[in-house]
Structure formats: C-alpha cells, structure tokens
Amino acid sequence: MAEERHGQDDVWDVVVVGSGFGGSVVACRAAQREKRVLVLERGRWYRPGEFPRTPLQMATNTWDPEAGLFGLFQLWSFRRMDAVVASGVGGGSLIYANVAMRMPEEWFARQHRDWPLTYADLDEHYGTVEKMLGVQALPEHLDHRVPKAAAFVRAARRAGLEPRRVPLAVSFPGPDQPLGEDVEDGENVHGVRRRTCRLCGECDLGCNEGAKNTLDLTYLSAATSRSLRQPATIRELCEVRRVTPVGDGYEVGYVEHAPDDRMAGRVGDDRGPRARTVRARKVVLAAGALGSTWLLLTNHAALPALSPALGRRFSGNGDALGFLAADRESAVDSAGGPVITHVARAGDHLVEDGGHPVFASWVATAAQPGLHRQGVRILAARVRARLAGRPDSDVSAEVARVLATARTARSTLPVLAMGLDPTTGTMRLGRHGQLRIDWPHDEGYLRGVWATLDRIADAMGWRFRKGLSDWLSRGITAHPLGGVPMGRDRWDGVVDSYGEVYGHPGLFVADGSVVPGPIGANPSLTIAALAERFATKITED
C-alpha cells in the first residue's frame, strides 16, 4: 500500500494521536494557544442518538478493521488478563461510567518514589478538569429514582464502611425539572441538542441523550470552536501506524479507513484503506496504555533512543468485578440511574456500586430458566382448566407470577473494585507484531477485595459471587495503565514529568500509559490532569 505524501497543508505544529482523556486535553490547550493542531482518531464520530442499541448494531459494535469492524469497543484477551478499551472520537469518555475522582493523596504518597512529580503538580490541575467536565455528584432529589444507590449505602454502612457520593461528569436535571430536560451548554462540536440524564443506566454503552459530559462535548468542542484563530482539525477513522523523526520534527504515517455502513460499524463494500502521512514539529501519542505502548514498540527501530523501560510497569489499576445477590424479601433493582453513584474505601481498595441498562433487565429476565418453567406450568394449568370447562379470561395474575420468578434479574447488584494492586506486568511484541502482556497473576491483593465484598454481603444477609473472569483465573480491567512510564531519567522511565520522550525531543505521550503505577481510583481525572500539565510544555515555542 503506497503512502500519499504530505502536502503543504499537511504540515502542523502539533499532531495528536488519539482523542481520549490525554489527547483531547492537549488538543484543546494547543488550539487555544494558536497552534495548528491535527487530531488523528482511529474511531469515528458518535453524535448523541447514534450509539448502537439494537441487537444487529451491537453485533458489529467492536473494533477489528481486518474483520471489517469499526465499532466502539475493542476487547483484548491476553494471557491471564483481559481489557476493554474504546474506539471513537472522545476515546474512553464515550463508554466510561462518568466517575471523575481524584487520586487519594495518601495513596500517591505510598508510591511517590515512582512518580517524578509531586501531588501538588497534579492537584493544581484537578480543579481545571473538573470545571471543564462539569463534575457533580448525583443530586439528592434523584435518590428516590435510583434504589440501587440506597441499597449499596445501607450495605456498606452495615459492613462498617463510610460510603460517599462519587463525582460524575454528567448533566443532571434540577430539583424542579423533569428528566431529559434540554442542556444549555452553548456551542458543541456536533451542533445537536443535548438532554439531561434520564437515569437509563446506559452510560457504558454511549449516552444517546448527550447527558454525559464526554470529551467531544467539552474539550474537543472547545478545541474546534469557531471563536479560535486556529481551531483544531479532527480526522476520524485514521489509524496511526508509523512515527519517524524527520528534520526538526516527525512524520506520522496512518491508514484512513473507509467503511460504508457507519451506523453499524461494519464495512459492507469497503473502498479500501488509504495510507497517508503528515508532518509536525511536535507529535503527541495519546492512544491509551495499549495503543501508545504498541506504537512505540513497533517503531522502536526508527526511535532508537527509547528507554529500556518501554513496556514496563503495566497495571490493571486493581480492577475487579463481583455481584451481590439479594434474597426475595430484600430484592433490589440495579437497573437504571448512573452506572456508579457511590464509593466506599476499605484499606488499599475502593468499592463502588454498579448498575446496568434497563433493557438488560429484560434480557436477563428472558434468559432465566425459572421463568420458562413457570410459564409452562401456568400454560398447562390453563389448558386443564379449559378442558374442564372452567376457563378464566383474566390472565394478569399468571403473567405477574411468571415475571416474578426471574429474581436474579431484579436482585443482583454489580459491585466494582479498584485499588493499589502491587502487581505489574510487561508489554512486548509477539512473533507477528501483536501486543502481548506478561502478567504475574497474584491473588494477594484480590483476596482483600473479595473479603471486603463478602463482608458487605454478609452484613445484608446476601450472597457474594465472583465474576466469571476470576473463576477462569484471569484479571480484567477497564483501566489499563503503564507501558510508557514516567521516570526521573531514561533508565527510570520512558518520558519525563512533562510527558516528553527521553532521547526524542518534540515527541510526547499523554495518556494512561505514562502512569507509573496504579492510581487506585478511577483514573480518568488524573490522566486529564497530567495532560493539562503536559500541555504547558507541549505548547511552548
């Protein structure tokens, strides 16, 4: 595949690879400082209302270009570790659970030797990100509409923990407003109307109401604002493969995908990808812990001064998933609401309530064997009654009994955990250039997590169930970190405290890959705060 060479218009001050919590921040600040900024995002734009929901759309909503799939989710399966990442303009903000939590200062202190900066260096930027993302907790006037939140608070308190509301990047209606009220946010990049949260629980699938204050609706809208002298340019479906030093900057080679069926995310009649190149004085890799690490590993020959620490210090941020199963009398509806509303801390880990979309309850209900058995019994009883000449035309009670048998669908509360898991892995390239992770599965940290969840379940008279991944002796993470860790020199890390790659001036990394260890809390806010710090150097002349 021949590359189309760059033209005069394809020379930029800053090229940003990826549009997640690092790339969007850098693109915004660079554009506001009148730099010519190009953002290359491998995924596509998703306007509110365009996120897949039907079974047909969801069946093709994964990312695998070789299979003709250009959807929102990329699912990685490594030895002993699985990971989920996003592919779309706005990166992980499109599918995360909205939590914008600061890293606890005492947890930073426990790892301070691994970080080439101070907590104050982070703290000065946290507030900026919170303001940009419109962070607030679930308002109390909506508590009665989210029963799972009250159930989690009650269970945590009985277990001796102190639950508190989590900060969320969500637009909620006011006390006197209905759900789904229009959001007055001024200009946004899509030019569409947004609505406040309807408590539908679909945060992790992409918000079709526009209630999530995602990066496309915040930082990227600011980066492309018509009020700027140099609005940033964002190119979707552009997957970067190559970064090469050239002159006083870098040449970036990428593939431009061209799927036809954009709603489903699948190619029907693919016109074929085109290879292109652009040049920039500065390049910022922000493709996530897995993406940025893979890019540097595959381009190591062109970037020979890369640190020997490349690929090291991979962390799953202590992520774990479990379920609290209530009995018939204390059943709790975990559908709806924001996916996460509260958090409780227990030693070296956090526990958060989980949820799922309302429609998932119906899917789970339909899958319950008890529902089908009860339905057959009731049908047989009605046939016998009809044959005996005693038919009853009112079947309301029978239908209610059938639905009531599906207790699992309405009495299981997902719980999420994350924390200071000391386990670290190493990323490397396999024989055929694919990413590999060597992960030393260590049960020590997880035993503490499971003990906490057992304690919460026991306090309510419930049962605790581990997730399927644990039964398979595999870790699972939605927050992969590390691989391009920060360090005090090139022997200690790949980048310095401002994200610049040692040995390659003008090449930066701004995403979760630079984090040298677990953040413990949901990492999105910390990654964005680091990017705010990095942007101060990236935008220097």
Image (cartoon, rainbow, N blue to C red):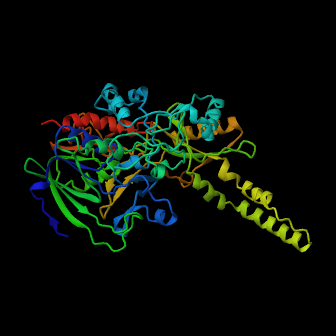
> Compared with residue 518, is residue 67 higher up or lower down, i.e. above or below?
below
Coordinates of residue 169 in the picture (x, y in percent): 43, 38
Coordinates of residue 460 in the picture (x, y in percent): 69, 37
User: Residue 484, can we see it?
Assistant: no
Q: Which is nearer the eye, 64 or 98?
A: 98
* Residue occupying the point 34% across, 65% down: 65
> Compared with residue 474, is residue 129 higher up or lower down, i.e. above or below?
above
- How many tags in the picture? 0
Coordinates of residue 247 in the picture (x, y in percent): 7, 50
> Compared with residue 152, is residue 9 higher up or lower down, i.e. above or below?
below
- For the C terminus, the image quarter is top left
For residue 463, what is the image quadrant?
A: top right
For residue 108, what is the image quadrant?
A: top left
Relative horizontal placement of residue 506, taking residue 334 as reference (left or right) = left
Relative horizontal placement of residue 447, taking residue 100 as reference (left or right) = right
User: Residue 319, can we see it?
Assistant: yes
- For the N terminus, the image quarter is bottom left
> Compared with residue 98, is residue 65 higher up or lower down, i.e. above or below?
below
